[in-house]
Image: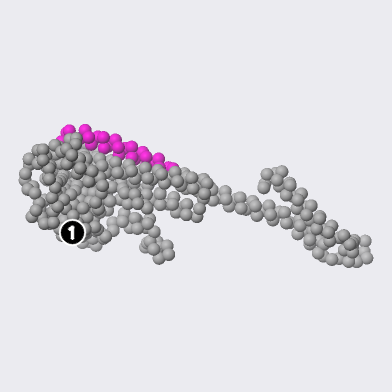
């Protein structure tokens, strides 16, 4: 059952639901089911043809407008943004010869980064960490052929547009290289985008460190919990990505050229650096949590010390008031002469004041206050 606060789910709870596979098919249903994820954005398909010194881009609203897939002289990039139209995506994958199980992985967007090799295509699942109020992990799926690459995104992202601009500007190797180099460019952009998420987490750590040190509030622990969850999400994303890139470098795939593997090694180095950063940030987050608990304990001790000092100051005053409050008046030698003394009341007040001042001075000398 989901935890609720004032009738609303917290961001952490929502993300945990998504990590468990929100929008999955019913357990026991047939494999290869084409069910769009809940809350998916509208589907838009763009086809980019490039190579041989030319390039063009087409918005696809009907699959009949797809460029010729058998033209080996140019490269074709089919970019699908939004997964709301499951039927259109299913028809597109059927036209491209995508295996039904791979299509199911595309639409069920909780998948761990991985590689599946099929007869004509290489299927790669990667993830993008984007930072809003909390970190959100989005799935990016790639089908890599000899000269065709099909990408599926949950929502439109800026880094895909930057790659498209590189193709149109004919900058670097991407315009003249094959679909495998385009796949590398997308993976490299994903890893770089995850660097931005890591930088955002570092800023949050610095902010929380200042808050715990100087201005501790009731919401600090909740912020630390959210940070811890985001770091765990980063770790669950980066570690499998490292394995994916390493597998692309180590194993032989017919669509990955040896020249591209040199660039993939750079991606692998970046994933190692990201893993190191995430592990350092997790240790810092654990230190922040311990520091917060220590600060709370120290604050409680200070409060208890002040209350104890105040109570100690009033103990002798209460004793004096209790003694003179007994009002014994007799002719025995043990009577209280102050009872009938005209200065008895001011004397007792001065005695109490002197006792309180003396004890206060003693506590100051002992540095208890």
Crowding near the residue tagged with mark 1, few <14, some 14–19, many ≥20 C-alpha atoms within 10 Å: some
Q: Which residues are magenta?
A: 257-284
Left or right: residue 236 versus residue 114 is right
Q: Does residue 79 lie above or below 322 as drawn?
A: above
How many dots with numbers?
Answer: 1
Secondary structure under the numbered disc 1 in the rendered image: helix
Tell which of 196 and 335 is nearer to you: 196
Q: Is residue 282 visible?
A: no
> Residue 19 location, x and y as percent?
31, 54
Tell me residue 353's x, y (percent): 78, 54
Q: Is residue 274 magenta?
A: yes
Query: Which residue appears at 17% of the width and 33% of the height?
Result: 259
- Residue 263 position, x and y percent, is 22, 35
Q: Is 55 a magenta residue?
A: no
Q: Residue at x 18, y 59 (%)?
A: 86
Q: Residue furthest front?
A: 169
Which colour scheme appears in the figure? one colour
SS majority, magenta: helix
Identify the residue at image location x=91%, y=66%: 330
Does residue 316 appear anywhere in the picture?
Answer: yes
Seen from the viewer's position, the closer of residues 367 and 245 is 367
- Horizontally, is 360 left or right of 86 in the view? right
**Image point 34% across, 55% down: which residue?**
15
Q: Which residue is mark 1?
A: 86
Quarter-of-image position of residue 28: bottom left
Residue 212: percent from left, percent from top: 50, 47
Quadrant location of the N terminus in the rendered image? bottom left
């Amino acid at each position: 059952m989901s935890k609720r606060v004032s009738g609303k789910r917290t961001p952490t709870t929502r993300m945990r639901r998504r990590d468990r596979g929100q929008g999955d098919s019913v357990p026991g249903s047939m494999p290869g089911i084409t069910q769009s994820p809940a809350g998916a954005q509208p589907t838009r398909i763009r086809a980019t043809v490039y190579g041989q010194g030319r390039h063009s881009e087409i918005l696809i609203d009907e699959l009949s407008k797809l460029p010729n897939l058998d033209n080996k002289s140019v490269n074709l990039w089919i970019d699908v943004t939004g997964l709301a139209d499951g039927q259109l995506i299913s028809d597109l994958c059927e036209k491209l010869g995508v295996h039904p199980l791979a299509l199911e992985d595309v639409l069920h967007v909780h998948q761990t980064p991985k590689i599946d090799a099929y007869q004509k295509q290489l299927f790669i699942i990667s993830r993008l960490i984007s930072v809003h109020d909390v970190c959100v992990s989005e799935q990016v799926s790639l089908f890599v052929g000899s000269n065709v690459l099909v990408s599926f995104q949950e929502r439109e992202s800026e880094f895909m547009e930057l790659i498209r601009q590189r193709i149109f500007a004919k900058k670097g190797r991407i315009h003249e290289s094959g679909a495998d180099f385009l796949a590398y460019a997308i993976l490299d952009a994903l890893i770089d985008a995850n660097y931005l998420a890591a930088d955002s987490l570092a800023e949050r750590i610095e902010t929380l460190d200042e808050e715990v040190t100087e201005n501790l509030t009731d919401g600090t622990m909740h912020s630390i919990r959210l940070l811890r969850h985001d770091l765990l999400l980063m770790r669950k994303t980066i570690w499998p990505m490292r394995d994916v890139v390493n597998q692309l470098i180590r194993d032989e795939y017919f669509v990955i050229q040896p020249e591209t593997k040199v660039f993939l090694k750079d991606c692998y180095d970046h994933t190692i650096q990201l893993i190191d950063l995430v592990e350092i940030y997790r240790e810092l987050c654990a230190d922040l949590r311990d520091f917060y608990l220590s600060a709370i304990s120290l604050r409680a001790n200070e409060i208890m010390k002040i209350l104890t000092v105040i109570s100690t100051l009033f103990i002798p005053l209460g004793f004096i008031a209790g003694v003179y409050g007994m009002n014994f008046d007799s002719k025995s030698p043990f009577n209280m002469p102050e009872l009938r003394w005209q200065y008895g009341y001011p004397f007792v007040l001065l005695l109490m004041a002197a006792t309180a001042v003396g004890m206060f001075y003693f506590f100051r000398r002992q540095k208890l206050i």
